[in-house]
Image: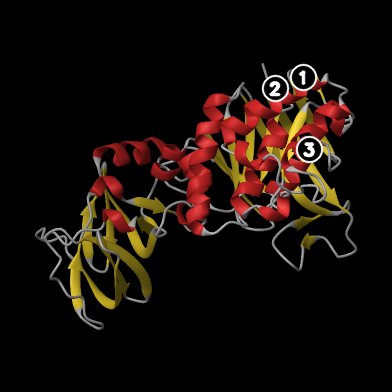
Amino acid sequence: MSTLELKHICKIYPNNEKKGHHKHNNLKTTDEGVLAVDDFNLEIKDKEFIVLVGPSGCGKSTTLRMVAGLEEITKGELYIDNKLMNDIEPKDRDIAMVFQSYALYPHMTVRQNMEFPLKLRKMPKEEIKKKVDEAAEILGITEYLDRKPKALSGGQRQRVAIGRAIVREPKVLLMDEPLSNLDAKLRNQMRAEIIKLRSRIDTTFIYVTHDQTEAMTLGDRIVIMKDGVVQQIGTPQQVYDTPVNLFVAGFIGVPMMNFFDGELIKDGMKYYVELNGVKIELSPEKEAKMAAKGVEAQKVTIGVRPEHMELTQREGQMIQATVDVSEMMGSHINVHIRVQEKEGVMIVDTQGNSNRNFRMGETIQFTFEPAVIHVFDAEGKNLEVKKEL
């Protein structure tokens, strides 16, 4: 069993500036210093794959380093298997970490690199050889065991770094942006390798990335962070379908969600959104959630994903837009549009539209189903969601 619990974890760095917000980013500053991670709470189940995701400087790597013991926890408590870890040395936490930079010993062969942590534990030679051979087979690097790291590609080096981590059979495997140094094709391959690896080893994973595609494909649950604060925790499908705020809505999904200025209209128990003079009734499920919260009419931001925008003609519900540019992607066309002053993208399937030309400056009309609309208030909160997280 390898469960983790992070309770009210904070990381504060000393700071000489005044209270408010740090001048280099939106991190809060207090009398104590800069809040790099603010009140982080998470329970991780045995063998769960958790992904911390967010833009640079959001506190995800700092959180990972606190779990590893490489950063001191300023406030809060970290438990591994119900044991308090705050003052336990990194080497005694039974955790392995894979870094972005591989961190391999250049003078050692692949086998020697992978043996190293086991030799430190004074494990018998036969057992070391068996564990290294097993890990090399799982990762497909058996033929490279006698090579030095400089003779390997980036993807092969990262496999070695992962191999060195898993031979120890750690309770928790931490991975800090392990694929960010690889090219796009290798990244895709290594993502698939990590999914396979996960099914073959019994450990709990915490994975840090700024790439939302990695987060969506790898994570059982995703923790989305911004400015040191957790924005939302949920399964990939939950954060995609029900983002709690504008930040999460814009961060998850490629191309990103379209945002338009509109009005929320309430008529008895009915709710409508009005965009560019067109009124669209919300779905019964969305109406019920808003009614339960007592949501009133107000100015809103309307969010619609590019794949949910349609050219289908629907009487009285067609919204006018101007084409900026179009990109032929093979299976679909990305049409960049402008509605009033807001820019957006719609994905048009080439099947049935392969001869369709979208000329710059052309006026087109689109619509969307009521069930796919997201409605955000002036503070950026999703009006359907009862509370953050």
Q: CA distance from mark 3 to mark 2?
A: 13 Å
Residue shown at 81% from the left, 27% from the top = 118
Which quadrant of the figure contains the C terminus? top right
Q: Amino acid at mark 1?
A: Glu
The x, y position of residue 276, in whole percent, is 26, 69
Provide the secondary structure element on which disc 3 rests. Answer: helix
* Contact between labelled residues 2 and 1, with CB atoms less than 8 Å apart: yes
Q: Amino acid at mark 3?
A: Gln
82 vs 365, nearest the viewer: 82
Which quadrant of the figure contains the N terminus? top right
Provide the secondary structure element on which disc 2 rests. Answer: helix
Confirm whether residue 209 shows in the render.
no
169 vs 234, nearest the viewer: 169
Q: Is residue 119 above or below residue 24?
A: above
- Give the image quarter of residue 336: bottom left
Residue shown at 76% from the left, 51% from the top = 36
Confirm whether residue 352 shows in the render.
yes
Residue, disc 3? 112
Residue, disc 1? 126
Left or right, residue 22 beside residue 225: right
* Contact between labelled residues 2 and 3, with CB atoms less than 8 Å apart: no
Residue, disc 2? 130
Pointer 3 or 1: first along the chain: 3
The x, y position of residue 170, in whole percent, is 72, 26
In this view, which residue lies farthest toward the bottom? Answer: 361
